[in-house]
Image (cartoon, rainbow, N blue to C red):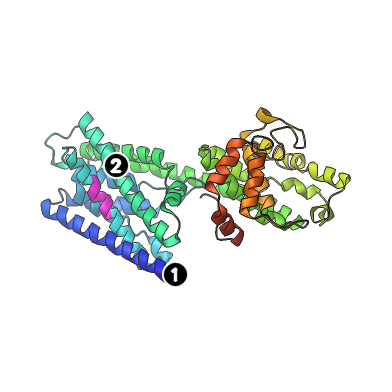
Amino acid sequence: MSAPLKNRVLSYTVLVSMVATVAVAAVARDGAVPDWRLTLFLGALSFLAECFAFRIPFGGSVSLAFAIEFAAVLLGGPLMGAIVCVCSAIPPQDIVARKPPLRMLFNVSQLALSGVVAGLTLSAFGVAPLLLQPTPALSLQILVAALAAAAVQALTNMLLVAGAISLSADVPFREVWRQSFSSYSVSLVVLALLGIVLAQLLLLAGLPGALLVVVPFAVSRQTFQVYRHLSESYRDTLRSLIAVLEAKDPYTRGHSERVAFYARQIADGLSLGPESVQTIELAALLHDIGKVGVSVATLTKPAALTSEEYGEVKLHPLSGAQVLEGIDFLAEVVPLIAAHHERMDGSGYPLGLVGSGLPEGAKVLAVADTFDAITSDRAYRRALPFSEAADVVRRAAGDTLDQSVVEALLVRVDADVLARVLRGDIRWEART
């Protein structure tokens, strides 16, 4: 990290820490923790939940910590919430990984601040902490206030973390938000509701009531672990398939990853769902797997191909589909790979499909593949600069390439992005 970036991250961390310190001091002056025994219990539970958090492919991490921290806010207000939040800020895995002290300080500060603002949101709705209410019963007012507080707590946490990532990685805030946090809304609603349930159980059944939530979560965690191991096996299968192709044509590795990057940009620009984006990315990575059946001499030939050689190349989409069709978890990518060289006007291959007959994902692959092909050096020609490449795909839009797909590409990929991709500064990475 460059010196200017380090200074910006340091200033940001110091600012967040100062604001958090002032906020915690203010709520500590205005009110005490209503139940230290319960606070310590929830703090320990939050710490354990974060210790046993784990990552799942394309879904972030699974942890009960937010629900526990939110339950603390509901039960005891901003100070109790901040204390419980801080308990999960530095799990053992961070110490083992030797994360920088500055990052740990930031985590402590932003979590404490999120707990405080959530508690203050409850107060703004006229709702007192449940432990301080004479007859704590769940009403519509409390439920609305609780959901608002959960939204504020989550939003504070995500905005502060996204800001830190943006500064440290020198990536636009908007891009960090889109890549890392934009799809968390459903999970946060579930965890918020779980926090409300946990708070009610603790009020009705005391500390043993927490087991009614913790035990099912532990069982679910084991199920997710099995899923994670299975997903890792799937990824290993993908790596093996790509390795086979790389051995035949080393150029393909960089090409496939760039096509996957452009395809993701297009799919996100078209607002396709997470599952569709994942399917398109996998298809982009494997779209040229059928070239294992094409001779090396043809793949690397610097001159124009003969009709016979071109006929050999034109079969690779179907060959790729045949290679993958026996793998169950790749079933959805097979039609995209088979059609990635089809064109809107029917001039593509191998089947000459037209317009509406092309899968949406295949239209995305066609544009991403074409754009990378003309902006990369090949054995038989030099790469085009961005301006010329953009003109090429614009002229093809509505004719051989889908108009909306081309527009989505050119909105999200400009000359600067292309230059960074070709330098290797921006690379496709699996969402894990």
Q: Residues within 10 Å of mark 1 (few under 14, many from 20)?
A: few
Residue 415 picture quarter: bottom right
| Residue plotted at (62% across, 37% down) | 361
Q: Secondary structure at mark 2?
A: helix
* Kind of residue at badge 1: Ser
- In the displayed structure image, the side of residue 348 where residue 401 appears, left or right: left
* Outermost bottom residue: 3
Q: Which residues are magenta?
A: 112-118
Q: CA distance from mark 1 to mark 2?
A: 36 Å
Task: Single out the mark in the foreground, 1 or 2.
Answer: 1
Q: Tag 2 or tag 1, which sits nearer the N-term?
A: 1
Q: Is 342 colored magenta in this rendering?
A: no
* Position of residue 267 measured from the top left corner of the image (x, y, whole percent): 55, 41
Give the dominant element type of the magenta stretch: helix, strand or loop.
helix
Residue denoted by label 2: 150
* Position of residue 16 measured from the top left corner of the image (x, y, whole percent): 28, 59
Q: Secondary structure at mark 1?
A: loop
Q: Residues within 10 Å of mark 2 (few under 14, many from 20)?
A: many
| Residue plotted at (20% across, 55% down) | 23
Residue 332 picture quarter: top right
Residue denoted by label 1: 2
